[in-house]
Amino acid sequence: MSGWLSDHRLYIEIAGVIISLIYLYLSIRQHILLWPLGILSAVMYVVVYFLTKFYADMGLNVYYIFVSIYGWIHWSKPPENKAELPVTNLRIVHGLVLFGIFIILFVTMGELLKRITDSPIPYWDALTTAGSVVATWMLTRKILQHWLVWVVVDLISMGLYIYRGLYPTVLLFAVYTAMAVVGFLQWRKSMKAPE
């Protein structure tokens, strides 16, 4: 099975890119179907990252599977007086907690990857993974500023994927970066729209 996966990695990666772009579009539109597509693309990227030795990103996609289930449930239960879960701003206290979680994840994953894997870039891998964990959790809560975290994570990820030769994924992350800016503007606009 691993031989077949290796032989077809590029096709799996391209399918993951296409599904991820649809996921991103639905995310910007605040459409709940983004979550099942997130699960599907995460499964595909678990395979891609395993085959290319991006172990933290592989683990991140396992996390995406579970956080997508959580997001799906959370988004399907809006407050009683709302038709859907509203977009909110990040509060300072939550921002500090999330930054602390980011630092703990980054340092812990970086050390683990350095010591127990053959990852060629353990701390860079850990940096994007820790940022992605925080940003995805913020998405499940519809926190506007998650888009800004994604801009930083996506730009760094592009450099890492160029380094590892994952060119279809580089293109995906270039689109992700641009669309994160669009998403931020769309979500901010939806916050100002009358109910």
Image: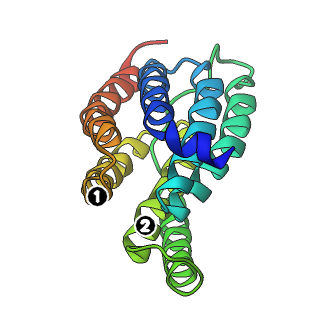
Quadrant of res 177: top left
Where is 11 relative to 54, above or below?
above
Q: Circle 2: is it few (<14), some (14-19), or many (20+) Cα within 10 Å?
A: many
Q: Which amino acid does label 1 sit on?
A: Ile
Image quarter hosting the N terminus: top right
Where is 147 relative to 127, above or below?
above
- Residue at 49%, 74% in the rendered image: 106
Q: Determine which residue is flagged by label 1.
A: 156
Name the secondary structure under disc 1: helix
Can I make out residue 93 in this image?
no
**Residue 90 horizontal/vertical position (percent):** 46, 49
- Residue at 49%, 12% in the rendered image: 195
Depth order, front residue of 71/174: 174
Depth order, front residue of 189/112: 112
Depth order, front residue of 41/185: 41
Q: Which amino acid does label 2 sit on?
A: Asp
- Residue at 28%, 42% in the rendered image: 167
